[in-house]
Amino acid sequence: MDAQLAEVRALEAEIAALRRACEEPRAAGEDSWRAQKSLREMYQSDSEGWASSKDLRSHLGHLESELRFLSTLTGISIRNYSMKTEDLTNTEKKEKSIMKVLQRHRLSGNCRMITFQLEFQILEIQNKESLSSVITDLNIIMEPTEYSELSEFVSRAEERRDLLMFFRSLHFFVEWCEYRKRTFEHFKEKYPAAVHLPEGAASSCMAVRSTCQPGFELVIVWRVQIDEEGKVLPKLDLLPKAPQQALKLDRNRVLETAPLSFRALLGTLGIEAALESLIKSLCTADYD
């Protein structure tokens, strides 16, 4: 995942450079020579075989195809991207062998239904032996969303200046949210009389009601959590509801222990099979 995201950024930068090269008018003299020289310096290994504007456009099409593939694979699409560089190399004698460049990046995009804007700075330090780079500043702007779990995660990613964690965790978070939505919709279609989605399929709750025993209801709360290290995990809880009279007659404490039993069921059967078993146990008479 990290390598794919890094490749997306590299492809975006290369596509932008190639677009500028393709759109430049064919001018004679010094301006044309400078444009060609600049392009060769930036992408020497790739551009040595390019003999014409047609070659550039062909390579650009190939890169855009790769970018579309990566966007489909990761669910992350970059709409706008820009970068500015500033040479911070110290001119003092003792620093002459060290080059410092500050890159300022800005981009906007979306991961499926979640839209974001990023501003970050990368400081590159190069000497005779090595080249190192570090993110010195990261600012993430998220469009308003119903997913409250993302707020704390975004603040943590900014504090750590961990760009790859942001993209990786956002990708898996969206995947889990879409899986939850598909699962809720599936059970609503399969058991329309028993399953209710009070806040719609995109919410975190699903209610199961028995049509033959009024007042009995099981509420499944399905949250998608992001831990301190950026790992995305589903968390499902069961909230049983029953008439007061039924609670008094429940000498075996079945309703009281239902949440713990549900967690054990999840570990044994998995999410979909556990939910199906739960629905059938409450609505046996309706779906025999």
Image (cartoon, helix red, strand yellow):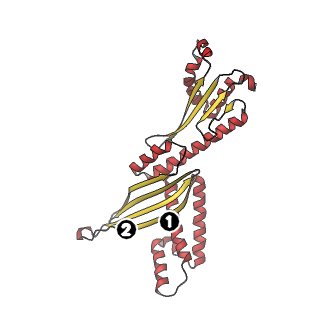
Label 2: few (<14), some (14–19) or many (≥20) C-alpha neighbours in 10 Å: few
Numbered badge on residue 273: none
Decide which of 23, 204 is in the foreground and name it. 204
Inspect this view and state whether residue 7 appears. no
Q: Is residue 160 left or right of residue 182?
A: left
Q: Nearer the viewer, mark 1 or mark 2?
A: 2
Measure the C-alpha gap from mark 1 to mark 2. Answer: 17 Å
Three-letter residue code for mark 1: Ala
Compared to residue 7, the image places residue 221 above or below, namely above
Q: Secondary structure at mark 1?
A: helix
- Residue most extreme to the bottom: 29
The residue that appears at 67% across and 24% down in the rendered structure is: 282
Q: Is residue 191 left or right of residue 46?
A: right
**Quadrant where the C terminus lies?**
top right
Determine whether label 1 and label 2 are within 8 Å by CB: no
Percent across and percent down for residue 33 are 47, 83
Percent across and percent down for residue 19 are 55, 72
Quarter of the view holding residue 271: top right
Percent across and percent down for residue 31 are 47, 83
The residue that appears at 47% across and 73% down in the rendered structure is: 44
Compared to residue 196, the image places residue 15 above or below, namely below
The residue that appears at 62% across and 14% down in the rendered structure is: 245
Give the residue pinned by disc 2.
86
Say whether disc 1 or disc 2 marks the residue closer to the N-terminus. Answer: 1
The residue that appears at 46% across and 52% down in the rendered structure is: 164
Q: Secondary structure at mark 2?
A: strand
